[in-house]
C-alpha cells in the first residue's frame, strides 16, 4: 500500500529481484538507494511502459507504489 512514509529500504528495494539487480548492474544498482534515486525517472518510464523487467511487466499497483515513492520525496 502506498503511504506517506513509503521508504526505499522497506518498500521499494524488496520489489527488485536478485535477477533484476544482476541484469541491470552495468547501468545502475537497483539495490542502491543512491542509484535508484538518481535514475528514478528512467526507471519509472520503463516500469510504466512495461518494457522492464525484461521478462514481464509489473502489476500496475506496484508501478504506482514506485511512482508514489518518487513523488513523495524518495525517502530512504
Ligand atoms: C524491475 C527491474 C528492472 C528495471 C527497473 C529496469 C530498468 C531499466 C532501465 C531504466 C533501462 C534503461 C537504462 C539506460 O538506458 O540507462 C534498462 C535497460 C535494459 N535492461 Fe532493464 N530493468 C529491470 C530488469 C531487467 C531484467 C530482468 C533484464 C533481463 C535480462 C533487463 C535487461 C535490460 C537490458 C538488456 C537493457 C538495455 C537495452 C534496453 O535499453 O532495452 N532489465 N532497464
Image: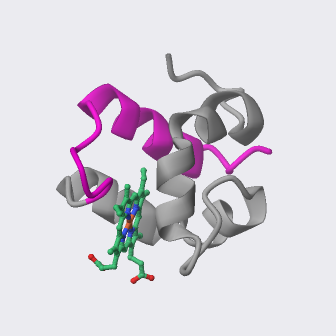
The quarter of the rendered structure image containing the C terminus is top right
Q: Residue 2: x and y, percent?
A: 51, 23
In percent of the image, x 33 and y 27: which residue is there? Answer: 61
The image quarter containing residue 64 is top left
- Residue 39 is one of the magenta-drawn residues: no
* Magenta-drawn segment: 52-76
Residue 70 is left or right of residue 4, and the answer is left
Q: How is the image coloured?
A: one colour
Q: Residue 70: x and y, percent?
A: 56, 51
Between residues 67 and 72, which one lies in front from this camera angle? 67
Asked if 54 appears above or below 71 in the picture, the reply is below
Between residues 15 and 4, which one lies in front from this camera angle? 15
Residue 2 is left or right of residue 6, and the answer is left
Q: Residue 36: x and y, percent?
A: 62, 61
Is residue 71 in view? no
Between residues 46 and 69, which one lies in front from this camera angle? 46
- Residue 61 is one of the magenta-drawn residues: yes
Asked if 48 appears above or below 13 in the picture, the reply is below
Residue sitting farthest toward the top: 1
In percent of the image, x 71 and y 27: which residue is there? Answer: 5
In percent of the image, x 68 and y 68: which residue is there? Answer: 35
In percent of the image, x 61 and y 43: which residue is there? Answer: 72
Residue 50 is left or right of residue 2, and the answer is left
Amino acid at each position: 500500500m502506498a503511504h506517506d512514509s513509503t521508504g526505499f529500504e522497506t518498500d521499494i528495494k524488496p520489489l527488485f529481484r536478485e535477477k533484476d539487480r544482476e541484469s541491470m548492474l552495468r547501468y545502475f544498482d537497483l539495490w542502491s538507494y543512491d542509484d535508484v534515486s538518481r535514475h528514478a525517472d528512467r526507471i519509472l518510464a520503463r516500469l510504466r511502459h512495461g518494457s522492464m523487467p525484461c521478462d514481464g511487466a509489473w502489476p500496475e499497483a506496484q508501478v504506482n507504489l514506485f511512482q508514489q515513492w518518487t513523488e513523495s520525496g524518495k525517502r530512504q
